Image: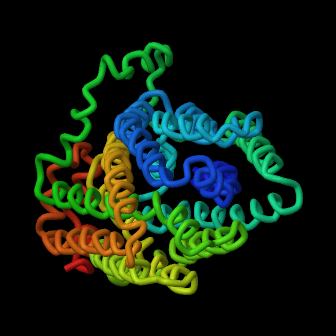
Amino acid sequence: MDYTKILPVLFLEYLAISLTKTLIPKLIVDKFEGYSYFVVGVSETVKGLLAFVSCPIFGKLSDQVGRKLCILLSMVGTTFPVCIMSFTSNVTIYVILLSLSGLFSGTFTLTFAYIADCVEKRKRAAAYGLALATFGLSFSVGPLLGSYLHENFGSRFVFYTSLVLVVLNIIYISFLLPETSKNMKSINRLELVMDYMPNKWNVFETFRIFRSDPFMSNLAAIVLLYYTSVWALVSTLMVYVTRQLNMSVLSLGWLLSGYGIATMISEGFIVRIVIPKIGEVNAVRLGLFAFTIQCLVISISSTPFWIFVSVFFSMLANLVYPSISSLVSRTVSESEQGETLGALNGIKAMTEGFGPLLFGLIMSLFENSSQPGAPYLLVGVISFWALLHSFDIDRESVIRAQQLYSKDEEHLNLLSDTEIEEDISINS
């Protein structure tokens, strides 16, 4: 089956969101002023904690009832905050709904599981990269288009456009997106959904896969540290450049589009070239090193120019996510793809839960100092810590993990022949 049919879902969803990205920081700063970092931190914290629960649930549920229904629910829930702004200008309502949207943060979990249904293991890293390139494309187009629409038609028109894109996405998913899951149960779907309600499910049970093996534990530590630093940066950077560097809506549009283009180039081209040549593990190391440098550059930036320079390093930093996702996907059996990728994204979501709040408070403390960007040095240190963890991953630990978590006979057979040697020797 053609996995590229999932790409329009990603593009439309994140285009709807990215259209509003240049407007939201100013709306928040105008509304909450000196409390902006705190409000953003609390909102992202609630969103992340809810996503910590919902990502594994969506992944596990999609293994049972199919990807399509879960993708539809996730997309609608994620985009609902920007859609509601078509009908109100109350920023407080937006912030509350953004926090609650964490309940539906399963898009990438489900997209990667969808791809795993369609693509053989050796080609998944490139396929994941293409999905992330699509995400980058939406963020290349969206912020600039949103800035243009804002300047010419007003902010409300931007939110109307997002609403239209969400409706188009609902139609596409409902009528054009094929189902791919091979493990769907033929019994009543509503009964299955009820079985996965939080009161009937142990949220920590899914994360067992990251607790019982050194290889998986190392990956979990890398994801935890790396995404703690990523969310600390992502959640504050737009407010920081708005308050400290006085970036306009148009400048924010160019900056966000720059990051989007960097993601598109990285995931669409660099991933396909670098990972096959140096392997997933080395690609993770390269990406972590680049992100560390990116944080250091931002920390010393006194003009918008250096913020734009940091975009270059983000191209290599984007190697981390598809490389780790590919390693995890190739380790577990086919019947656990959604659940395991959901657990991986759950760890990411957990960092979204505590990273922004703690870092928002730190940013507030340094806001009126001579070095307001100094907290980004701490972000770089956390990223470097993740880089050190990556050197604990070796060839033997990968092979042991694949043998431990392989359950179906076909997967075990694959482990015994030369394919696994070719896959892992590159990483040694």
Residue found 31% across the figure and 69% down from its top: 379
The answer to whether residue 303 is above or below residue 403 is below
From the viewer's side, name the closer residue of 362 and 98.
Answer: 362
Where residue 93 sits in the image (x, y, percent)?
61, 34
Residue sitting at x 52%, y 33%? 70
42 to 70, vertically: above or below: below
User: Picture quarter containing residue 78?
Assistant: top right
Closer to the camera in the image, 275 or 226: 226
**Where is residue 21 shown, x and y percent of the image?**
64, 57
Q: Quadrant of the C terminus?
A: bottom left
Closer-to-camera residue (336/52): 52
> Which residue is outermost to the right?
152
Q: Image quarter for residue 376?
A: bottom left
From the viewer's perspective, tell me whether residue 78 is left or right of residue 353.
right
Residue at the image position 66 percent from the left and 43 percent from the top: 82
The answer to whether residue 148 is seen in the rendering is: yes
Residue 47 percent coordinates (x, y): 44, 41
Q: Is residue 121 visible?
A: no
